[in-house]
Amino acid sequence: MVVSAGLVVLTFPPFGISYLALVAWIPLLWALKDASLAAGTHLGFLHGMLSFAGTLCWLWGLFGPLSIGLWAVLALFSAVFGLSVAMAQKCLKNRLHLLAVIPVLWAGIEYFRCEVFTLHFPWITPGTGFEPNLFTGIVGVYGVSLVLIWAGGSLALGGRTGRITGALALVLMVFPLSRLDWARDIQKAEVDGNVSVAIVQSEECYFRAYADLSETISEPVDAILWPEYAVSNDLMTSPVDLARTMALMRSKSASILVTGSRTNLENGDYYNTALTVGLNGELGRHFKNRPVHFFKDGQPGTESAVIETPIGKIGTPICFDCDYGEVVRNAVLGGAEILLVPSMDAISWGERQHLQHAELFKHRAAENGRWMAVAATSGRSQVIAPWGDVVDELPLMDPGILHGMVRIRSELTPYTTGGWLVGPIMMWSAAGIFVGLSIAMIRAKKCEVSIAHEAVAGRD
């Protein structure tokens, strides 16, 4: 179990040995073999504490001792998994049934923890630890977790046939998404579909800093992308700043500029906003659907905006929006052909946080088959291909400009059109399995008590 937690830590940045995700959870499954209910719960919790504390140690810099409580809350989900596996082993005597139930329990608990539970924390999962792969554009990261845990369970708990099928599944996981026909076609696309983007990275979150830095853009571009909160107020309410923005765009031949901004509300609150400006004024805005927990980050928006622009239909999810599947998927379903993402990761949060957060954008791009450009205040600003490869990026923490190329794409992946349902289906299935196992355990206990009473009565 300790070995498993260590492998999990090495899977994620800053180590980033992603292929360890293929085997990192197998020692945990071995440790849970024939475990009692108490032992399964304790092993799961300890594994969660070591894994989350080891990967998310940067939380200590933000919350101090309170981070221990956060790690413990996340570890509770691992404890529930350990308990569930122990219950399943006691109730299910058929090995095939057991091997089918274990990955459903994991994927269902994971989806609930990441997408439904109050903390909504989708970091550090098997599906996000491994590189985008053949399954990512079909069933998404929760489906990838399902396959990884199924393969690991087959190797750890299965017989000869189970071990063979588990090993074959892991081999398929190594098959890169970029080998699919549509990915190869995109790589060979004609330049007519190309859109040049200047991505501006700077920790100085005020208009003049970004305008001055953008003046150094060295070549004509189609779009300029600034990070989240690059403009502290609504740009459209400042005629002077808006005039300079238009002049900047004309000087760089840009058709649009996307910037992080605010939309103030009458009650004194605001929406964290991605504002898209064209040469004739505002083209549209997206309100951040998923504000960051424990921070003042505005009121949550309710729609994934798709904005008609001279370069095509764009989606502009903001930072934490891309940690989850729903916001990006809805934008693509709504017609977004390119994703231009303002983001913010403060320098004070550290390199480990920046690197771990940057990984999630790759999976959103690969799930939905879209080119994605991300402008982050201090990194990682990057250009990501629809198969999840980072094709260009800026160094962390240093201000600068990244000249990148993205491409228009309108086709939908299997994940976007229906594969995303794997997560919620697994969640409800896991809930049903847990209830069924609990009922079976209670009935078995009652039978044991009844038999014991009958034995006592017989002796009397």
Image: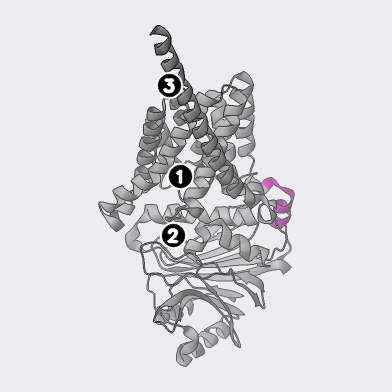
Against 354, residue 157 (above or below) is: above
Q: Locate residue 87, reporting x and y percent.
A: 48, 29
State how far apart marks 2 and 3 are (Cα).
65 Å
Question: Hey, which residue is sitting farthest top in the picture?
Answer: 459
Q: Nearer the viewer, residue 447 or 238?
A: 447
Bin the neighbour count of mark 2 within 10 Å (Cα to Cα): few under 14, some 14-19, many 20 and up. some
State how far apart marks 2 and 1 are (Cα).
17 Å
Q: Which residues are drawn in magenta?
A: 179-188
Q: Residue at x 47, y 49 (%)?
A: 113
Which is more foreground, mark 2 or mark 3? 3
Question: Mark 2 — residue?
Answer: 395
Q: Amino acid at mark 3?
A: Val
Q: Locate residue 234, reporting x and y percent.
A: 46, 83
Q: Amino acid at mark 2?
A: Pro
State how far apart marks 1 and 3 are (Cα).
51 Å
* 86 with respect to 159 (left or right): left
Against 301, residue 87 (above or below) is: above
344 part of magenta stretch: no
User: Could you tell me if residue 149 is visible in this image?
Assistant: no
Bin the neighbour count of mark 1 within 10 Å (Cα to Cα): few under 14, some 14-19, many 20 and up. some
Q: Residue at x 47, y 84 (%)?
A: 235
Question: Mark 3 — residue?
Answer: 449
Q: Locate residue 12, reporting x and y percent.
A: 44, 45
Q: Locate residue 361, reporting x and y percent.
A: 53, 57
